[in-house]
Amino acid sequence: MTSQYNHNLTSKITKTLRKLLQPIQPNGTILIAINNDPVYQQYFGFADIGENQSTSLQTQYLIASITKQFSAAALLNVLYIAAKNGSKTDAELEKNVTTALQKAVSNYLPRTHEIWANSMPEWADTVTLHQLLVHSSGIPNYTSLPGFDSLKNMNDVDIISIFKIHALEFVPGTKFSYTNSGYFMLGTLIQEISGQPFDQYLQTTFFNPLEMHSTHLPVGGTVNDLKQHDSRFSNLARGYTYNITVPHAKLTEVDHYTAMQIPGSAGGLVSTVSDLLIWNNALYGGKILPSFLVNMMLQSYIQTEKQNEYYGYGIEIKNTPSFGVYYTHRGGIPGFQSRLTYIPAYQLSIVISENVRGDKERLYPEIEAIKLELPKTLPESELSQRLEEILESKYPSVAENRIHYQLTPLEDSVINVLANSATPRENHHE
């Protein structure tokens, strides 16, 4: 892209965000950049309201399910290293990694492995690593199972025991169903293959070499514990929530923070927007994995519940008629939400993290009741839209509060600016 084109694009993005941000009161940080050059960067509100501590570009946030692309990259890397020993050519190496991904979980975690606590589920003999990566395993999502909210001091064996006892929801490989359980299993698999604890593997393989000094995977404790007892998390924000059904809702700190061993490799990372920009440029620039492994991550393996959206390995893949494919993922955990996006046509990253998340859980019983009244034949994408419309018609404050507090929806506005500014796709590159 020419510098003049970059300047015009930057101006449009900046003007749009300034206009949208005027009436809202978010807590969080935005960083938009072309390669390493910031297009827009700003921080808002408080990392700690009680201490009157403002956010900054150094504020650390829980990034929840954005963790999944780190777990996917780590798994590919350990399989790559293992396959190198028995591969004579690049073609053979790629074939051996692909073969390893198609093997069942029990090939790496046999019946006698301690993780199963003497009771390996039948699905371990059939569910493959590939199916775990693309959410087509059929394993129930442990964060949606009864009793999940009461989980506290549990280790990996305890957490896997929660979901391993349930039958698969469908034949593996036949459909997409987002499940944290699959990605939690990946953490154990990476530890087994690499011989290193997962948090240490991430640190030595990715974070230290890339100088992502504020990014870490805590293996236990809550936000309170991390801030009080671990200097690595000195800039960690506190998380806030609000009642989405109440007009002009007030922010309150999260009552019960998640113990960080519970999301683990499915959603436990802590990071800053600056570090996530480093990650984006390194991943898509081929500095983390060999190009064939990056290509594996970015394949559109399976359609998600949304139209024109597919899942790769830890990454959602979307397509636009104006500027083509782009890669994204969102993350949400009580008190925090984030978005991480990369748009190849512009070499542009959008990184948004915030320490505010609406308390939608209080509406779950009502949402389930509405689902029962809607036609069973509705596709998932239309079902989600209808649900949102019904809830917002009953509770106008849902949309009002979202506009008032949340930064993450601004990603859609940036995407629209890019779409409306797009020249023919072949002209996007110099």
Image (cartoon, helix red, strand yellow):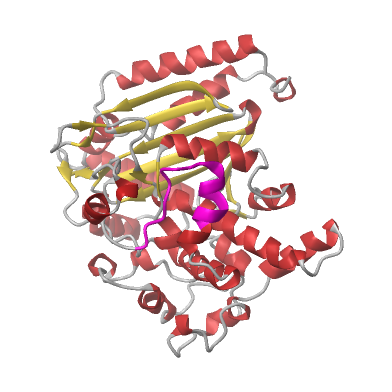
Residue at screen point 31% across, 45% down: 336
Residue 122 percent location from the top left of the image: 53, 85
Residue 289 as seen in the image, left or right of residue 380: right
**Residue 90 picture quarter:** bottom right
Residue at screen point 35% across, 31% down: 29
Residue 178 visible? The answer is no
Say which of 148 and 40 sits in front.
40
Q: Quadrant of the N terminus?
A: top right
Highlighted magenta segment, given as a residue range: 202-219
Say which of 144 and 79 sits in front.
79
Residue 222 as seen in the image, left or right of residue 94: left
Residue at screen point 47% across, 84% down: 114
| Vertical placement of residue 109 versus 272, above or below | below
Residue 406 percent location from the top left of the image: 31, 34
**Residue 318 picture quarter:** top right
**Residue 337 picture quarter:** top left
Residue 429 percent location from the top left of the image: 71, 23
